[in-house]
Image: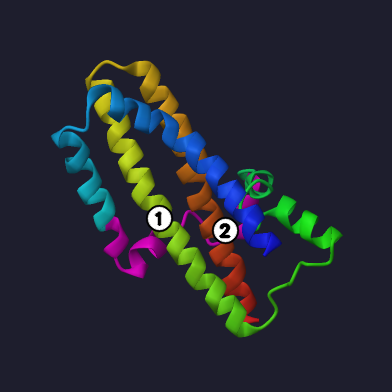
Amino acid sequence: MKRQLLNQLINIFWTVLAFAPVLAFWLAIGMNVYFYLFIIPSICLLFLPNHFYERLQLSDRPEDYQRLGLKFFRRYTQDGDIVKQILRKDNSLKLRRTKKEFVNYHRTIEVYERYHMVCFAFFLLTGFYAIALANFAIFILITMANILYNVIPLLLQQYNRLRIQRLLTD
């Protein structure tokens, strides 16, 4: 229960922070036809086969992801290092240990990856539209939000997938 609460608080924080510039942009200009033209193909990314996402894998070596500083960002994510540290203090941390739990976590990774890919595409298209409207400040804010909210989590999911695959093959 405590884990779920901590994770939801983290999710709410990052979601509000990241969606703020995107929502501000669309509310300022009005949700016109471009909003729908951007959201439809973004949502279609949910339905791509798993091998599409596997091909986007930046590297097959966890060390490459670590060099990008992903361990730093992992601290501030759901089920990240800070959440684990808090749960360890009151002995409510349950470690994933069985093969079934690793397989389930692998599926969870796939869900997170699809969600962030949809958001990435929508943020990217929205940012390009902001440039087309010569709104460079909002473009910069949307791009920063896209990197923090989508690019880094996508890389984290790739990193986690590698770690889980290694555990499943050992």
Decide which of 16, 78 is in the foreground and name it. 16
Above or below — where is 23 with respect to 12? above
From the image, give the main secondary structure of the stretch colored magenta.
Answer: helix
Is there a contact, CB below 8 Å, between mark 2 and mark 1?
no
Q: Residue at x 64, y 76 (%)?
A: 167
Provide residue 43's location: percent of width, then percent of height: 27, 54
163 relative position to 38: left or right = right
Tell me if residue 80 comes above or below residue 148 in the rendering.
below
Instruction: Kindly identify the amino acid type of the residue bearing the numbered disc 1.
Output: Tyr
Labelled disc at residue 159: 2
- Check disc 2 and give the amino acid type: Tyr
Of the two numbered discs 2 and 1 in the rendering, the one whose residue sits closer to the viewer: 1
Q: Quadrant of the N terminus?
A: bottom right
Q: Is residue 130 highlighted in magenta?
A: no
In reply to whether residue 55 is colored magenta, the answer given is yes
Residue 104, how many percent across, how many down? 54, 76
Residue 170, numbered label? none
Q: Residues within 10 Å of mark 2 (few under 14, many from 20)?
A: many
Which stretch is magenta? 45-67
Callout 1 secondary element: helix
What is the C-alpha distance between the residues marked 2 and 1?
Answer: 16 Å
**Circle count:** 2
Residue matched to label 1 = 115
81 sits to left or right of 34: right
- Residue 135, given in percent of the width and then of the height, sits at 31, 17
Colour scheme of the rendered structure: rainbow
**Outermost residue toward the left in this view:** 33
Q: Residue at x 58, y 53 (%)?
A: 8
Q: Look at 82% across and 61% down and name the residue there.
A: 88
Q: Position of residue 155 (x, y in %)?
A: 52, 51
Between discs 2 and 1, the one toward the N terminus: 1
